[in-house]
């Protein structure tokens, strides 16, 4: 083993030659002064061209500035005098009350700028954007690009710009509509928004109207009719009683109406039927016993009810869902079925009422032959008949009556 080690130890390996690789690497990183000088010359040429272009533009601007400063109207066919003459010939009526067409081109929190093809733009304040109170003109659909008819209501002294309004136009339209509704004697909805010692204020068609006091109606929508419409005096008088009277006239016994549960009491539920409060007594909810009304009805529920009775003098309306049940207890178990069959069941109820009334009249006529009517064996009313022959009787041979 020692001799073998000495043999390996005496071996010498020649060094690995990397001359080729080093030469290749050096050739890549070799400095070429000629190539760099060509690139520098090209860059310098581009820079010189840009400098010349900038100098040329600078000279053009300086020349234009000098001409504008010294001879601004040279070679210009349209002079300042011509411009002023054109403005004088342009007929634009800017009197207050004049209606103009305009296009909205900008809006902000305070209003909108409107192009009305005048010397300057006009301004629409947010308070004049609608008959209703707004926080931003966009709430009234006023956005850039909208073209609308405005009315001039003033002038801004600071810059002579005109102040526009849509509110004034809408007021005129609202008064006109109120006059038409009054002429047609229409019942419409109005929201009560305020109250004082004399009455309450309701909003109708965007206008504030006055009616007799009823503070419990505050913030509610109620049926109203016009009593007086006077635009010149800004006087709009409304009547809830007149509207209610017309509505009540349509409440026939046995008719089906849609109502909304207003409140629950131990004895029944108050139902709003078009501005009129009717009572649905607990005994008239269902044929089955209802121990707790809240298990069947809740405030805000919409339902169909039948008019059971109507006391116009006292303003009381009695309602029923019991009479609308196809089978007893349906109002508790399946109210949807009751409402679906409501008209059909009400028709049956009205027929029974009509038959009962006819029988009552027949009973009265049975004991009143002087009425000229009689009741046949079939129960049909008809004219009073006689068993005498058509040619009559010959009474000439009839012996005189004895004393």
Image (cartoon, grey):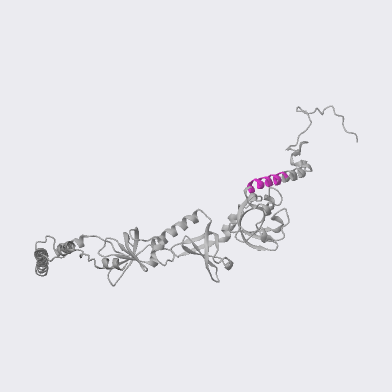
Front residue of 369 and 92:
92
Horizontally, residue 251 falls left or right of residue 136, namely: right
Residue 393 on image: x %, y % = 80, 28
Front residue of 23 and 95:
23
Outermost bottom residue: 158
The residue drawn where x is 76% and y is 41% is 370
Kindly tell me whether residue 308 is visible in this rendering: no
Residue 16 on image: x %, y % = 21, 64
Residue 258 on image: x %, y % = 60, 53
The residue drawn where x is 50% and y is 53% is 184
- Is-magenta flag for residue 324? no
Front residue of 395 and 340:
340
Q: Quadrant of the C terminus?
A: top right
Q: Is residue 13 above or below residue 329?
A: below
Horizontally, residue 105 falls left or right of residue 270, namely: left
Which quadrant holds residue 276? bottom right
Kindly tell me whether residue 284 is visible in this rendering: yes
Q: Main secondary structure of the magenta part?
A: helix
Q: Which residues are magenta?
A: 341-355
Q: Quadrant of the N terminus?
A: bottom left
Residue 121 on image: x %, y % = 28, 64
């Amino acid at each position: 083993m020692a001799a073998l080690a000495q043999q390996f130890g005496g071996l010498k390996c020649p060094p690995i030659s990397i001359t080729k690789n080093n030469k290749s690497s050096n050739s890549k990183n070799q400095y070429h002064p000629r190539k760099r000088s060509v690139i520098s010359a090209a860059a310098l040429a581009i820079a010189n061209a840009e400098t010349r272009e900038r100098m040329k533009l600078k000279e053009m601007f300086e020349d234009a500035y000098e001409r504008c400063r010294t001879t601004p109207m040279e070679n210009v066919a349209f002079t300042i005098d011509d411009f002023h003459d054109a403005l004088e010939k342009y007929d634009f009526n800017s009197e207050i009350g004049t209606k103009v067409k305009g296009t909205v081109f900008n809006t902000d929190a305070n209003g909108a700028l409107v192009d009305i093809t005048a010397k300057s733009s006009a301004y629409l304040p947010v308070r004049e954007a609608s008959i209703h109170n707004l926080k931003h003109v966009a709430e009234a659909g006023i956005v850039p690009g909208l073209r609308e008819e405005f009315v001039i209501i003033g002038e801004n002294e600071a810059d002579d710009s005109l102040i526009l309004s849509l509110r004034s136009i809408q007021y005129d339209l609202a008064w006109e509509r109120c006059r038409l509704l009054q002429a047609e004697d229409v019942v419409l909805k109005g929201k009560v928004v305020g109250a004082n010692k004399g009455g309450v204020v309701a909003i109708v068609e965007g206008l504030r109207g006055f009616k007799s006091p009823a503070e419990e109606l505050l913030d509610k929508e109620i049926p109203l009719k016009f009593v007086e419409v006077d635009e010149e005096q800004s006087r709009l008088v409304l009547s809830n009683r007149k509207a209610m009277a017309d509505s009540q006239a349509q409440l026939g016994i046995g008719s089906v109406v849609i109502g909304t549960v207003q409140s629950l009491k131990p004895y029944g539920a108050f139902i709003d039927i078009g501005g009129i409060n009717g009572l649905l007594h607990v005994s008239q909810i269902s044929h089955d016993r209802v121990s707790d009304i809240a298990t069947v009805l809740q405030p805000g529920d919409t339902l169909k009810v039948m008019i059971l009775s109507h006391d116009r003098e006292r303003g009381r309306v009695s309602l029923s869902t019991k009479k609308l049940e196809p089978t007893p207890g349906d109002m508790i178990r399946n109210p949807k079925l009751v409402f679906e069959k409501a008209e059909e069941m009400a028709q049956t109820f009205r027929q029974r009422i009509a038959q009962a009334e006819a029988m009552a009249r027949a009973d009265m006529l049975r004991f009143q032959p002087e009425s000229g009517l009689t009741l046949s064996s079939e129960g049909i009313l008809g004219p009073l008949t006689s068993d005498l022959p058509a040619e009559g009787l010959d009474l000439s041979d009839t012996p005189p009556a004895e004393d």
